[in-house]
């Protein structure tokens, strides 16, 4: 496909909708205190089988990102359309997760409470504690082996393989990956993951013993949560109205 064809696709109504939604997710994350400088990235695959995906660019704060700032890249992370450069760690991590883990939407953050749990020996959220945590029961993988900045393809591939098909990955000493089939679903998970981690960190800080529920109940609540995603779509629409 030529550069002109990529540019035409980039301006199509379907891809513009995806760019709008991705930019909204980034602004929402900034609004909720989940961003970190100009670092970390959100991406969404273009659903045409080409492997191309949309990504926030290098150097912009999340709260300022609009649809026209989003860039289109190929399976190797090469920019195909858009006016801004691509940051190298985003290219290596996101291209690998889309390609290997087969995830349509990939949100990577160093949001504070989730990242705090990656610094503990458990490395992860206890999905049998709060109701918010139970929605992630059976959906979490842990990558315990921090290996430095993702400055080459092998590190992105290592992270993608460590996910083992999970929607949520806690990356030891690093941050989290939240994946989904749709941007609104993935953002809802990202938001409530941080809420669940916040509750756990606060509970741990009291020094009192924690009181998880049994695994069967945690599993049932998780299934209930995933069986009804209308709230996820409504939450994202509400964010669009205020942001």
Image: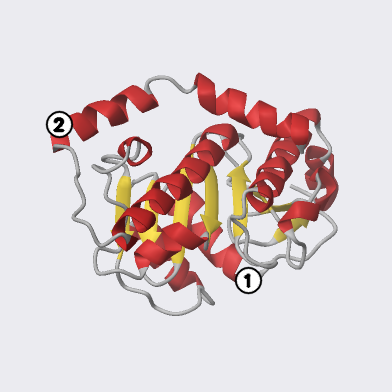
What percent of the width, then of the height, locates residue 6?
78, 46
In which image quadrant can residue 176 be found?
bottom left
Above or below: residue 139 compared with residue 37: above
Q: Is residue 203 visible?
A: yes
What percent of the width, then of the height, locates residue 143?
32, 64
The answer for how far apart the CA atoms under marks 2 and 1 are is 42 Å
Mark closer to the observer (2, 1)? 2
Identify the residue at image location x=60%, y=23%. Answer: 234
What percent of the width, then of the height, locates residue 139?
32, 42
What percent of the width, then of the height, locates residue 133?
34, 42
Residue situated in front as seen by the camera: 143 or 95: 143
Marker disc for residue 216: 2
Name the side, left or right, on which 94 lies relative to 163: right
Name the side, left or right, on which 41 lies relative to 221: right
Q: Is residue 164 visible?
A: no
Name the side, left or right, on which 90 lies relative to 220: right
Q: Residues within 10 Å of mark 1 (few under 14, many from 20)?
A: some
Task: Name the residue tied to disc 1.
Answer: 88
Look at the image and tell me in which quarter the C terminus lies. top right
């Amino acid at each position: 496909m030529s550069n002109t064809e990529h540019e035409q696709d980039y301006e199509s109504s379907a891809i513009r909708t995806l760019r709008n939604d991705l930019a909204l997710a980034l602004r929402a994350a900034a609004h909720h205190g989940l961003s970190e400088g100009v670092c970390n990235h959100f991406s969404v695959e273009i659903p045409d089988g080409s492997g191309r995906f949309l990504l926030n660019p290098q150097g912009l704060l999340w709260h300022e990102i609009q649809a026209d700032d989003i860039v289109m890249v190929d399976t190797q992370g090469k920019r195909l359309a858009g006016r801004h450069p691509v940051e190298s760690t985003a290219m290596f991590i996101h291209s690998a997760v889309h390609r290997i883990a087969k995830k349509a939407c990939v949100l990577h953050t160093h949001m504070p409470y989730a990242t705090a749990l990656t610094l503990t020996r458990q490395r992860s959220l206890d999905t049998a504690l709060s109701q918010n945590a139970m929605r992630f029961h059976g959906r979490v993988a842990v990558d315990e082996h921090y290996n430095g900045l993702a400055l080459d393809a092998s590190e992105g591939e290592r992270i993608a393989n460590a996910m083992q098909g999970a929607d949520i990955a806690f990356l030891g000493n690093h941050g989290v990956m939240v994946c989904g089939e749709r941007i609104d679903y993935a953002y809802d998970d990202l938001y409530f993951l941080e809420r669940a981690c916040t509750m756990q960190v606060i509970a741990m800080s009291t020094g009192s013993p924690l009181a998880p529920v049994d695994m069967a109940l945690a599993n049932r609540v998780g299934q209930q949560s995933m069986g009804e995603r209308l709230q996820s779509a409504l939450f994202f629409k509400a964010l669009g109205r205020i942001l």
